[in-house]
């Protein structure tokens, strides 16, 4: 019988890092305050004491340097896991991400791969300043050569993190901090992986397909449960990976229901909802019975505390979006 622990999402991240450090000597964790301090959210707490400063490395506050150093380490065969304290701080390292992380395999004609996993807490809802709360995952999904993973449960956080670290190519691993400590789940103590690029159906339904990921999975399921009591059955699909998207699962759910809504906290313009809509238009147009709905953040700079709850999609706003699609 597999032994499990009842963990929060951030604890599952820590357990996943611990497991991969133990399993593979080429794995190193690096970033600002990840060592002795254990990270701003304590995702790396205890790792420095067990594995030492050569494998859990405190770096200067220099995002370009953190990512660039990890690129060099990965090119030479290590498996670095750099952490950026908040995803909104990744922009000083953006050149390293798009010019080197994403292109190294292609530029070297396959001579080099970059088995590195760039971790960052992302998303809003915790009353942090605006540069700590935005959701710009579409930046990275747009860049060929990068995989972009966003877990929504503790079990999948550990399994997806392990799959990312073991992957031969670079992964952007975004951790929705709103749900870091929101709930617990049984997580196996032994090593395991969850496949990158495969969506998961969280709820079966025949009336409308709802696509979401990360922290928005919980309010989407809450909305689906409420509507289920009214006789509207939602199929909720958690994408888990936004690059590559699981196009087959997206199309299959839409063909089953003929209606769709996409939920994400990122702004509407240029967000993943537009890409998903395009996929459905290209591959399943003849199944469509209503316009595809988008329930998203707004096209404004991320607001400060007083307006944060209005900005993020709530279960009530998601319900309204679903009803609009169903009642068309």
Image (cartoon, rainbow, N blue to C red):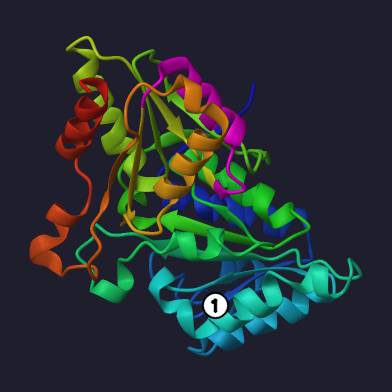
Total numbered labels: 1
Q: Is residue 268 above or below residue 160?
A: below
Locate residue 51, reporting x and y percent: 66, 68
Q: Residue at x 23, y 69 (%)?
A: 128
Left or right: residue 142 compared with residue 162 = left
Residue 71 or residue 291, whichever sits in front: 291
The N terminus sits in image quarter: top right
Residue interval drawn in magenta: 242-259
- Is there any visible trace of residue 246 in the rendered image? yes
Q: Position of residue 115 (x, y in %)?
A: 75, 63
The image position of residue 204, as x and y in percent, is: 42, 16
Residue 102 located left or right of residue 49:
right
Please, is residue 36 above or below residue 153 in the view? below
Q: Is residue 163 magenta?
A: no
Q: Nearer the viewer, residue 280 or 318?
A: 280
Residue 86 in view: no
Vertical arrangement, residue 100 with respect to residue 138, above or below: below
Q: Position of residue 206 (x, y in %)?
A: 38, 13
The crowd level at tag 1 (other Cα within 10 Å; few <14, some 14-19, many 20+) is: many
254 in magenta: yes
Q: Nearer the viewer, residue 195 or 199?
A: 199
Give the quadrant of residue 22. Answer: bottom right
Residue of label 1 = 31
Q: Residue at x 50, y 47 (%)?
A: 12
Q: At x 32% / y 26%, what residue is drawn? A: 290
Q: Main secondary structure of the magenta part?
A: helix
- Outermost residue, left side: 306
Residue at the image position 66 percent from the left and 62 percent from the top: 144
Q: Secondary structure at mark 1?
A: strand
Q: Residue furthest front?
A: 286
- The quarter of the rendered structure image containing the C terminus is top left
């Amino acid at each position: 019988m597999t032994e499990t622990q009842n963990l929060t999402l951030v604890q599952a991240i820590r357990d996943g890092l611990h497991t991969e450090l133990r399993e593979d000597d080429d794995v190193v964790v690096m970033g600002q305050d990840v060592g002795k301090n254990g990270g701003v959210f304590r995702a790396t707490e205890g790792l420095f004491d067990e594995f030492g400063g050569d494998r859990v490395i405190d770096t200067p506050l220099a995002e370009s340097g953190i990512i660039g150093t990890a690129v060099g380490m990965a090119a030479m065969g290590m498996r670095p896991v750099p952490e950026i304290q908040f995803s909104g701080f990744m922009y000083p390292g953006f050149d390293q991400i798009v010019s080197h992380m994403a292109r190294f395999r292609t530029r070297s004609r396959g001579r080099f791969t970059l088995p590195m996993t760039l971790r960052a807490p992302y998303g809003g809802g915790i009353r942090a300043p605006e540069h700590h709360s935005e959701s710009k995952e579409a930046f990275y999904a747009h860049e060929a050569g990068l995989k972009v993973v966003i877990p929504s449960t503790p079990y999948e956080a550990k399994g997806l993190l392990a799959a990312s670290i073991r992957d031969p190519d670079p992964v952007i691993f975004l951790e929705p901090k709103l749900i870091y400590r929101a709930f617990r789940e049984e997580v196996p103590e032994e090593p395991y992986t969850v496949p990158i690029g495969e969506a998961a159906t969280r709820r079966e339904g025949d009336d409308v397909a709802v696509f979401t990921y990360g922290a928005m999975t919980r309010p989407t399921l809450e909305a689906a449960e409420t509507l289920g009591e009214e006789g509207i059955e939602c199929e909720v699909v958690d994408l888990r990976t936004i690059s590559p998207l699981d196009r087959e699962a997206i199309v299959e759910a839409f063909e089953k229901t003929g209606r769709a809504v996409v939920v994400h906290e990122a702004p509407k313009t240029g967000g993943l909802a537009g890409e998903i809509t395009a996929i459905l238009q290209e591959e399943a147009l003849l199944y469509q019975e209503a316009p595809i709905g988008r329930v998203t953040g707004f096209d404004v700079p991320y607001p400060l505390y007083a307006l944060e709850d209005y900005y993020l999609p709530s279960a009530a706003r998601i319900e309204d979006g679903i009803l609009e699609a169903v009642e068309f």
